[in-house]
Amino acid sequence: MDSPQTLSQHTEVQSEKQLEEPLSEQRHEPKAEHKQHGLADFPDGGSRAWGVALGNSGVMFCTLGYINSWGVYQAYYQENQLHDQNQSAISWIGSLQTFFLFAASLVGGPLFDRYGAKVIYPPAVIYVFTIFMTSICKEYYQFMLCQGVLSGISSGLAMAPTMAATPQYFLKKRGAAMGLAVAGSSLGGVIFPIALNRMLTTTDLGFGWSVRIVAFLVLAILLVSCPPVRARLPPRKTNFLLPRAFKEPGYAALVIGAFFMFLGMFPPLFYIPSYGLSQGMTPTMAFYLSGTLNAASFPGRILPAIISDKFGRLNTFAGAGITTGILTLCWQRVSGSGGVIVFTALFGFFSGAIISGGTVTFASSASDPKNIGTYMGMGMAVISIAPLIGPPISGALVDTAMAFKAISIFAGMASLFGGLFTLFVVKIAGGKKLLSLE
């Protein structure tokens, strides 16, 4: 017969082996799994948790918020440095920047899961450097390399870890916390376009110093925002990537639905200022449309995220895609400066919920909170192809006889399909009832 000490040692060894087993092998004991991985002790509040969310918001302000001002650059380059290039060629710069922002999550998310928040700092420094370098670019290839590639990669490697940190602190209030974090990108999308527009059109600063001032602003905010972001859980020691996630029907279907929503969401973000110019707006007023869109997306990223905690995260995400798709299909009927401004505000509100809804649903798709960064990173990497191809396709469409009407149909149908797919396929594939509040 074993002694009590031997039995105790045997129990400890067995527990350690249980912790090392893949998550898929432990699903027959959900209560034990929740206890092992800390699902029962999410802070769901407190100064440290909300500090992480605010730090995340600041990083989003500087990364996705800055990239959301691309409409200003698109219109400015079209009239100045790159006037010899067509709209599709110019849009490839912004498309690549957005693509690499999300694609870099494939590396940034797992890096956070394995090494914690310290992985934020090197790419943050490089990102600020790329903005300074953009200020001295003159040729198309220079803008493509610096603003399109290097800025996109470094901003994505800085953003992904902060996006993975916030869900580690929240469960019941995850939608509200992620909404607050993502809202930082909306605020950045308001301030950066307005600041750039004012400096480029009403001062004698010129392009170089206008962009350098933006770089100094980004540097100051990142210095304040990065330190509060910290990991709550110990590092994950398993594989760098978790490809088995794509074997989960709910996760795989979610990636597909989100892909089509993002495919339809980005073309209007790129081309609304150009559409304003085609409707007789002055360049100054057209540049302000990017600020209007992002101002409207600020409540659009917070309110639906809060609502998702009550009425279901998949429901809210699907609703965002459906309403954005319907609204984008109506874009082709919008005319006049007043109509463009109203459409821009409505589109900003409803499309904003796609960004916040996507981050919340991907964060919630990981059963083990230690894997949140990796699940989000892999999903965002696949979705990154949508903003890569969407705007250039739209740039080619705008040069056809149907012009902006073609973009309206293409983008609207993509968003509508993504929303309906999420509502009717993702929920069922994930084992949820169609009318459930999940």
Image: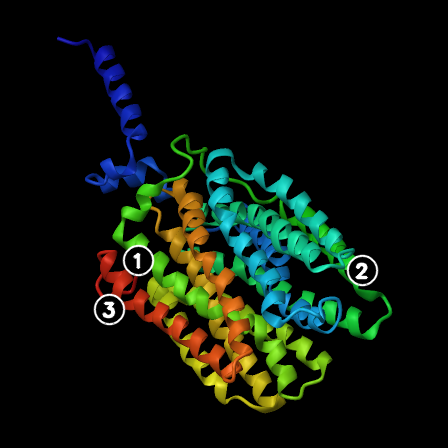
Query: In which quadrant of the rendered image does the N terminus lie?
Result: top left
Against 26, is 135 above or below? Answer: below
Q: Nearer the viewer, mark 2 or mark 1?
A: 2
Tell me if 198 is positioned left or right of 229 in this view: right
The residue wearing badge 2 is: 208
Closer to the chain start, of discs 3 and 2, is 2
Secondary structure, mark 1, is: helix
Closer to the chain start, of discs 2 and 1, is 2
The residue wearing badge 1 is: 253
Secondary structure, mark 3, is: loop
Depth check, front residue: 158 or 86: 86
Q: Residues within 10 Å of mark 3 (few under 14, many from 20)?
A: few
The residue wearing badge 3 is: 435
Coordinates of residue 177 in the picture (x, y in percent): 48, 56
Q: Nearer the viewer, mark 3 or mark 2?
A: 2
Q: Quadrant of residue 290?
A: bottom right
Q: Is residue 232 visible?
A: no
Coordinates of residue 144 in the picture (x, y in percent): 65, 56
User: Label 2 is placed on what type of residue?
Assistant: Gly
Residue at 23%, 61% (x, y): give it.
Answer: 428
Residue at 63%, 63% (x, y): give it.
Answer: 188
Against 365, is 416 above or below? Answer: below
Mark 3 and mark 2 residues within 8 Å of each other at the beta carbon: no
Residue at 65%, 52% (x, y): give it.
Answer: 145
Q: Residues within 10 Å of mark 1 (few under 14, many from 20)?
A: many
Mark 2 and mark 1 residues within 8 Å of each other at the beta carbon: no
